Amino acid sequence: MEGSPEKALLVAGFIYAKEEIYQRAKELLSPGWGEVTEESAAIPFEFTDYYRTEMGEGLLRRFAVFSTSFRAHRLKTAKKTAMQVEESLSSGGRRRINIDPGYLTADKLVLATHKQYPFSVAITEGISAVLELLYYTGSYQPLHWTYPDYRQMVEFFNGLRLRFFP
C-alpha cells in the first residue's frame, strides 16, 4: 500500500569495554525498545581511535536487535533515548558506552548519529541519519562511507534479512 510505513527492525550498535556496561544498557533500553531478540558476536573495535580517549582501551563492537515494532520516523526518539542511557552510565563525565540506534529494512540499514557528514541527512537538531548498507545483488552492500565495523557485520545483517524479511 502506497504511503504505509515499511516494516523495520530496531537495531543498535554498541561500543564498550566492559560486558557489564553493555548488559546494563540493554536493561535500561528494554522498557521502551523491548527485549533483545538477536545479537551479533562482539568484535574488537580497532578501526579508529575516536572513542579511545573518552572510553579507554579494549573496546568492543556489537549489534543487537530489539523486539519493539519500529517505524523509521521514530529514529530521532530512539537516538535521544540512547543518549540518555549513555549519560546514565557515564562516569566522571565520560561515556562508558556508545549507542547508535538505527533501523534495518529489507533494502537498507540506516544509522542515527551526532556526526555531520556530507552524506548524512539531518532529522532533528544535532541528529542525522546515514544510509550504511543497501541491499542489492543478493546481499547488503556497504557504501563508500560505510564504517569498517559495519562492513564486517554484513553477514549478520544478511542473516537478519533472511529471518525477518523472507
Image: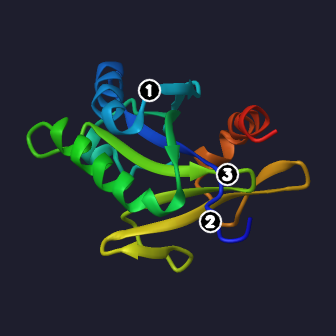
Q: Residue furthest left?
A: 92
Q: Residue furthest bottom?
A: 118
Q: Estimate the x, y position of residue 80 in percent, counting from the top left.
A: 29, 55
Query: Closest to the observer: 35 or 145?
Result: 35
Q: Amino acid at mark 1?
A: Glu
Marked residue nearer the N-terminal end (2 or 3): 3
User: Which labelled disc corresponds to residue 35?
Assistant: 1
Q: Estimate the x, y position of residue 118 in percent, counting from the top left.
A: 52, 80
Q: CA distance from mark 3 to mark 1?
A: 19 Å
Marked residue nearer the N-terminal end (1 or 2): 1
Q: Is residue 96 visible?
A: yes
Identify the residue position indicated by label 3 in the image: 105
Residue 121 vs 48, above or below: the answer is: below
Q: Estimate the x, y position of residue 65 in percent, counting from the top left.
A: 54, 35
Identify the residue position indicated by label 2 in the image: 145
Residue 45 vs 17, above or below: the answer is: below
Q: CA distance from mark 2 to mark 3?
A: 19 Å
Tell me: 81 left or right of 117: left
Question: For the point 22% across and 47% down, which residue is it?
Answer: 84
Quarter of the image where one finds residue 130: bottom right
